[in-house]
């Protein structure tokens, strides 16, 4: 049960089939297999060994797919990182994740050079070039750099797949935790293989499908639904480097896309794009929504304009990620995340772990071959999350008599901005480091475009600091989507009798 061997077999059986399309160029499964084998050989040659951790600081590109499958072929562990993260955020993941190698886009070189003292354990940086002129770097970084294109061109030998145990860690995905620091969910080869297999089966993917990949590939939603699952059945992945309504409409029309997957924000932006029309999406057979609850009005607006039905699902990084999806052979229910996918069990339990009857609200728990091994180097957190083989999601949900599930509320205090999870504690930690801030509390507020936005309430020592200064300060330490769009300076924060700040009272305002 490992994806790299499965996809290799597809390249043998259907070598001329298109594996992916990117910016006007097609790559066949035979060519994809060649690239994966060549990069794997080159990485081994510069020192990468089985079990090494390799961070990816890459956007949506062929380099991401080739690097992921080359990494799996060696038996190394991939650690995808959001390339828009700040130096502080990147540093934490690289250090906590025991990363030895980094594959990054060249636009991040100045940032990596700036933080070179933070990365003493990084042995090599493999740089994917987007510009003709190479950047001037410090000697320390320059001596550790290899260029992706040169590794691909330096030899014509290919690494044959290693013997890989399906329980070995294939990838570590960092997901924000309530402690403020991200937690690394360890996903095995079995986890990734099983969810790709079961998602492709449940969503009825075939080799004839052409799947748009505009969701960020470093995110688990995209990783499985628009990359691994299509490749599992020999379908074609249409890689979009960014989300732009005009570019997505053009890509869907010219490439005759059959599947589109997005977060609710994307569907809202596409609906509002005045130049989009029914003909642009006429080839779609399936539109998938996940990452955040899909407002019914957004669904109805999109479907009314483009005559394309949206099916909603549910997942989380710890489950590789998909656990539920609206079935393709039965009625789709608006507002529901659907039924359990193939080989995965979902159930609703009370605080004692006892299963609840239909329509009663409790915690959603999950069991299946897709559930993670645990959190990297966090045994206590792992034990809390996985109990008796069941993954406790922390999400409140209910189900109906036909076993369709409905999310009632998200994890306590979590904010979802355009599909990205933001935990208040992480933002508060940054605010508390500001010398003028006495207290801070962060909550989510409704946002027309992104579903939710981050709002911070702060108490200052002296009311001389302006909101704009605090936003600029946050921008230096947090990714853009985590930065509060609304900062409210108040004289005090509501607290309970023990002195705990009541976020719910602030949210209710």
Image (cartoon, rainbow, N blue to C red):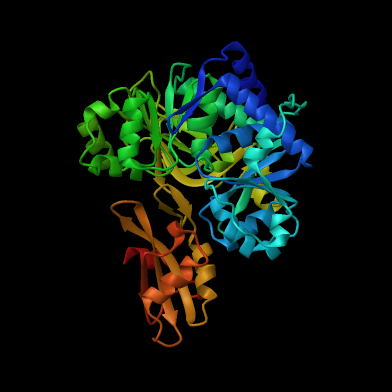
Tell whether 141 sits left or right of 258: right
User: Which quadrant is the N terminus positioned in?
Assistant: top right
Residue 68 in view: yes
Answer above or below: position of 289 versus 115: above
Which quarter of the rendered picture does the C terminus lie within? bottom left
Q: Residue at x 41, y 82 (%)?
A: 465
Q: Which quarter of the picture shows residue 87?
A: bottom right
- Foreground: 233 or 504? 233
Residue at horizontal 46 percent and vertical 44 percent from the top: 362
In the rendered image, residue 375, in percent from the top left (x then y), is placed at 66, 47
Identify the residue shown where x is 51% and y is 38%: 61
Res 74 → quadrant: top right
Residue 419 is left or right of residue 4, and the answer is left
Vertical comparison of 78 with 462: above or below: above
Q: In the rendering, at what x and y percent does residue 199 appear?
A: 50, 26
Residue at (59%, 25%) from the top-left corner? 32
Residue 98 coordinates in the image, percent (x, y): 73, 52
- Above or below, 459 against 236 in this view is below
Residue located farthest toward the top when viewing the structure as drawn: 13
State left or right for residue 489 relative to residue 308.
right
**How many marks can you see?**
0
- Kindly tell me whether residue 186 is visible in this rendering: no
Which x, y percent locates residue 236?
Answer: 48, 23
Q: Which residue is nearer to you in this view: 38 or 298?
A: 38
Please state which of residues 116 and 485 is positioned toward the viewer in this rendering.
116
**Residue 283 sits above or below residue 94 on the image:** above
């Amino acid at each position: 049960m490992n994806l790299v061997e499965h996809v290799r077999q597809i390249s043998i059986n259907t070598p001329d089939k298109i594996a992916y399309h990117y910016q006007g160029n097609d790559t066949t499964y035979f060519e994809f297999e060649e690239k994966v084998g060549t990069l794997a050989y080159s990485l081994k040659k510069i020192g990468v060994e089985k079990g090494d951790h390799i961070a990816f600081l890459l956007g949506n590109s062929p380099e991401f797919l080739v690097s992921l499958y080359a990494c799996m072929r060696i038996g190394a562990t991939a650690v995808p990182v959001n390339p828009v993260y700040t130096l502080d955020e990147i540093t934490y993941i690289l250090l906590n994740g025991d990363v030895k190698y980094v594959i990054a886009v060249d636009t991040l070189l100045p940032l990596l050079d700036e933080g070179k003292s933070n990365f003493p354990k990084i042995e090599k940086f493999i740089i994917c070039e987007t510009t003709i002129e190479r950047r001037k770097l410090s000697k320390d970084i320059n001596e550790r750099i290899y260029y992706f294109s040169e590794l691909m061109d330096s030899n014509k030998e290919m690494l044959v797949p290693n013997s890989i145990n399906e329980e070995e860690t294939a990838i570590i995905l960092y997901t924000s935790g309530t402690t403020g620091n991200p937690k690394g969910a360890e996903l095995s080869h079995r986890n990734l293989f099983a969810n790709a297999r079961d998602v492709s089966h449940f969503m009825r993917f075939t080799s004839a499908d052409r799947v748009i990949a505009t969701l960020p590939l470093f995110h688990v939603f995209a990783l499985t639904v628009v990359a691994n699952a299509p490749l599992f059945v020999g379908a074609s992945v249409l890689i979009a480097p960014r989300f732009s309504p005009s570019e997505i409409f053009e890509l869907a029309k010219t490439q005759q896309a059959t599947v589109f997957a997005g977060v609710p924000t994307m569907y809202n932006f596409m609906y509002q794009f005045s130049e989009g029309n029914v003909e642009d999406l006429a080839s779609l057979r399936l539109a998938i929504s996940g990452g955040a609850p899909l407002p019914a009005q957004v669904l109805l607006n999109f479907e009314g304009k483009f005559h394309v039905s949206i099916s909603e699902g549910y997942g989380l990084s710890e489950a590789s990620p998909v656990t539920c999806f609206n079935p393709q052979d039965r009625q789709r229910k608006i507002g529901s995340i659907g039924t359990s996918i193939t080989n995965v069990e979902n159930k609703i339990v009370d605080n004692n772990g006892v299963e609840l009857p239909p329509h009663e609200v409790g915690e959603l728990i999950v069991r299946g071959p897709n559930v993670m091994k645990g959190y990297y180097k966090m045994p206590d957190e792992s034990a809390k999350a996985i109990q008796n083989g069941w993954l406790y999601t922390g999400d409140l949900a209910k189900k109906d008599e036909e076993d369709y599930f409905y999310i009632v509320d998200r994890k306590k205090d979590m904010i979802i901005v355009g599909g990205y999870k933001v935990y208040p504690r992480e933002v508060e930690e940054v605010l508390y480091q500001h010398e003028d801030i006495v207290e801070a509390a962060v909550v989510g507020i409704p946002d027309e475009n992104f579903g939710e936005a981050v709002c911070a309430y702060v108490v200052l020592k002296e009311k001389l600091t302006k909101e704009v200064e605090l936003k600029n300060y946050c921008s230096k330490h947090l990714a853009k989507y985590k930065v509060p769009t609304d900062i409210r300076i108040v004289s005090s924060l509501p607290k309970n009798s023990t002195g705990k700040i009541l976020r719910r009272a602030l949210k209710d305002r």
